[in-house]
Image (cartoon, rainbow, N blue to C red):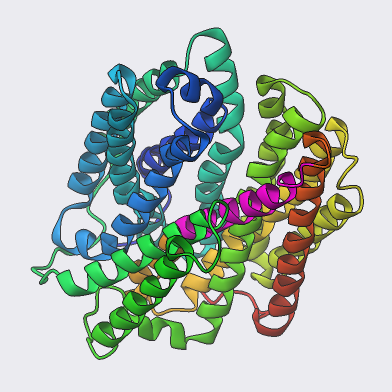
C-alpha cells in the first residue's frame, strides 16, 4: 500500500501524541504545586518528589515491552487501553483525600503514558513516506517537547486561579477528546503475531531500570557508598548484565542488545540521552532559580519557560525539513552548537542571571535542543533495518525517561550539595549550585559535539 499523508493519518498521529503530551504536561505542571501538596498532605519534600519520580519509574518499565505489545494487540486497542489507564489515574488524582492514593493515581497515569509513548512514533515510522519522515518526526517531538515547557505555565495558572486538582480535571477533558479522535483515525500499522511473552527478559530489564533510577534519585539525599545509592546501582548493574546474558542469543528478544552493535545507532542514542539529561536538568534548575534567587512568583517561573517552548517547537519543525533535504548532520550540528552557546553563557553568568537573561539563554538552548533532538532519533532509527524500528523506538523512549531522571537527580544533587553550606544565604548557594549544573551540562554538550563530528554521517538519509 502506498504511503501518503492524509487528514486521517495526521489525526491519528495527533491523537496518539495526545497521550504522551498529557503525561508529560501533568508531570511538569505538578512540579510547581509541590509546596502546596506538602502543606495539604503534611508530607516532606523527599516524599512529594515521588509524585513525578514514580511516573518515570512506571514508564521506564512499561516502554520496553511496547514492541511485543504492538505485535500481540491491535494498534487501536493499545491506544484505547493506554487512554483508559490514564483516565482512571486522573480520576483518582482528582478525588483522592490522601497522598498515597495520589501516588496510585499517578502510577496508573504512568502505565497509560508508557503504553502510549512509543505509539505515535510507531505510527509515523509505519505510515509516513520517507521523504516526509524527518518533518513528521519533528512534529512528533514538538508535541512532547512543548509539554515539558508548557507544563509549568499551565500548572501555575490553573493552581493560582482554581487549585491543583484542576490540572487533572482539564487533562480528563483533553483525554476524552483524544479517545474520540483516536478511535476514528487510528488503524492497524502491522500484522499481528502470536508471540510468546518474554517474562524473564522483561523482569530483568524492568528491575534494572527501577534500581538504577532509584540509585540516581537517592544521590541527593544519601551518601554515595550507602545502600540507597551504591547498593541500588550495584544491583541494577547486576540485573542489566543478567538481561544481556538472557537476551543476547535470543533471535526474537524483547529488546535485542545486538542493536547496540550498530555504532551509528548507539552513538546517536548516547547523544540523544545527553541532550535529554541537559534539558531536564535545566527544567529543574530555572524554576527554582527564578523563585529563590530572583524572588519571582510560581506563575512567573512558569511564564519564563514559555518562550523556550515556542522556539523549541519552531526549531523542531525546521530541523525536520532540513533533515529531509540535507541529511541529519546539519540540524544536529546547528542544534548542538546553539545549545552549547547557551550553556557556556549560563556558566559565565551563572550566579547573576536576570529573568530576561534566563528567557534568552533558555530559548537559545531549547532552540538548539529542538534542532538536534528529533534529528538524533530519526537518524538513529533509520540507521537500523525497518524490521528493527519498533525495538529501536522502544529503546529510545525507555532511555528518554531514564535520562530525564538522571538529569533531575544530577541537578538536584548539585543544588543540595551547594545549599548544605550554611555559612551563605540560600539565595547564594542556590545560584552556586545552578552554576555547577551549567558547568556539567556544558561538558556533556561538548561531548555531543565531538561525537556528532566523528560519527554522524553528513549524507542525506536514503529514501
Q: Is residue 413 magenta?
A: yes
In the rendered image, the vertical position of residue 219 relative to residue 366, given as above or below: below
Q: Is residue 73 left or right of residue 11?
A: left
In the rendered image, the vertical position of residue 137 relative to residue 81, given as above or below: below
Q: Residue at x 41, y 49 (%)?
A: 56
Q: Position of residue 46 (x, y in %)?
A: 49, 40
Q: Position of residue 132 (x, y in %)?
A: 52, 58
Q: Is residue 203 left or right of residue 126?
A: left
In the rendered image, the vertical position of residue 64 relative to residue 401, given as above or below: below
Q: Is residue 240 magenta?
A: no
For the residue pair 61 and 121, the one nearer the viewer reads as 61
Q: Residue at x 47, y 59 (%)?
A: 402
Q: Position of residue 197 (x, y in %)?
A: 13, 68
For the residue pair 420 and 61, the one nearer the viewer reads as 420
- Tell me where residue 431 sits by quadrant: top right
- Tell me where residue 60 sits by quadrant: bottom left
Question: The N terminus lies in which quarter of the figure?
Answer: bottom left
Give the residues drawn in magenta, as a range.
400-422
- Tell me where residue 330 sits by quadrant: bottom right
Q: Looking at the image, which residue sits at the far front?
A: 423
Q: Residue at x 69, y 79 (%)?
A: 451
Q: How many marks?
A: 0
Magenta stretch: dominant SS? helix
- Whether residue 175 is visible: yes
Q: Residue at x 14, y 61 (%)?
A: 72
Q: Looking at the image, which residue sits at the far bottom?
A: 249
Q: Position of residue 340 (x, y in %)?
A: 80, 61
- Whether residue 132 is visible: no
Amino acid at each position: 500500500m502506498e504511503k501518503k499523508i492524509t487528514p486521517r493519518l495526521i489525526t491519528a498521529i495527533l491523537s496518539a501524541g495526545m497521550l504522551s503530551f498529557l503525561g508529560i504536561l501533568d508531570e511538569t505542571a505538578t512540579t510547581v504545586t509541590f509546596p502546596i501538596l506538602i502543606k495539604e498532605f503534611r508530607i516532606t519534600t523527599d516524599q512529594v518528589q515521588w509524585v513525578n519520580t514514580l511516573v518515570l519509574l512506571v514508564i521506564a518499565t512499561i516502554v520496553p515491552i511496547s514492541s511485543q505489545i504492538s505485535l500481540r494487540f491491535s494498534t487501536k486497542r493499545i491506544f484505547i487501553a493506554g487512554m483508559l489507564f490514564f483516565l482512571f489515574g486522573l480520576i483518582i488524582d482528582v478525588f483522592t483525600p490522601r497522598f498515597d492514593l495520589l501516588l496510585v493515581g499517578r502510577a496508573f497515569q504512568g502505565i497509560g503514558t508508557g503504553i502510549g509513548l512509543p505509539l505515535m512514533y510507531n505510527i509515523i515510522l509505519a505510515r509516513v513516506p520517507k521523504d516526509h519522515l524527518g518533518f513528521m518526526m519533528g512534529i512528533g517531538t514538538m508535541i512532547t517537547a512543548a509539554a515539558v515547557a508548557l507544563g509549568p505555565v499551565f500548572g501555575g495558572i490553573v493552581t493560582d486561579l482554581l487549585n491543583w486538582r484542576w490540572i487533572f480535571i482539564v487533562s480528563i477533558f483533553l483525554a476524552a477528546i483524544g479517545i474520540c479522535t483516536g478511535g476514528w483515525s487510528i488503524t492497524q500499522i502491522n500484522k499481528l503475531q502470536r508471540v510468546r511473552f518474554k517474562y524473564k527478559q522483561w523482569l530483568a530489564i524492568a528491575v534494572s531500570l527501577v534500581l538504577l533510577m532509584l540509585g540516581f534519585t537517592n544521590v541527593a539525599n544519601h551518601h554515595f557508598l550507602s545502600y540507597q545509592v551504591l547498593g541500588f546501582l550495584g544491583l541494577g548493574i547486576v540485573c542489566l548484565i543478567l538481561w544481556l546474558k538472557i537476551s543476547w542469543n535470543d533471535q526474537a528478544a524483547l529488546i535485542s542488545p545486538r542493536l547496540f552493535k550498530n555504532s551509528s545507532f548507539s552513538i546517536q542514542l548516547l547523544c540523544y540521552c545527553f541532550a535529554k539529561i541537559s534539558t531536564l536538568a535545566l527544567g529543574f534548575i530555572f524554576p527554582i532559580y527564578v523563585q529563590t534567587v530572583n524572588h519571582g512568583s510560581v506563575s512567573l517561573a512558569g511564564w519564563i519557560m514559555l518562550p523556550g517552548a515556542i522556539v523549541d517547537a519552531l526549531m523542531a519543525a525546521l530541523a525536520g525539513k532540513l533533515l529531509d533535504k540535507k541529511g541529519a548532520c546539519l540540524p544536529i550540528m546547528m542544534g548542538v552548537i546553539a545549545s552549547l552557546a547557551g550553556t557556556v553563557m549560563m556558566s559565565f553568568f551563572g550566579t547573576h542571571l536576570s529573568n530576561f537573561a534566563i528567557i534568552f539563554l533558555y530559548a537559545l538552548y531549547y532552540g538548539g535542543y529542538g534542532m538536534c533532538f528529533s534529528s538524533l532519533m530519526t537518524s538513529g532509527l533509520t540507521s537500523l533495518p525497518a524490521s528493527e524500528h519498533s525495538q529501536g523506538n522502544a529503546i529510545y523512549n525507555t532511555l528518554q525517561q531514564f535520562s530525564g531522571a538522571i538529569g533531575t537527580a544530577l541537578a538536584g544533587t548539585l543544588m543540595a550539595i551547594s545549599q548544605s553550606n550554611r555559612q551563605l544565604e540560600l539565595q547564594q548557594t542556590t545560584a552556586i549550585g545552578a552554576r555547577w549544573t551549567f558547568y556539567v551540562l556544558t561538558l556533556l554538550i561538548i561531548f555531543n559535539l565531538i561525537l556528532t563530528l566523528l560519527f554522524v554521517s553528513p549524507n542525506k538519509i536514503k529514501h
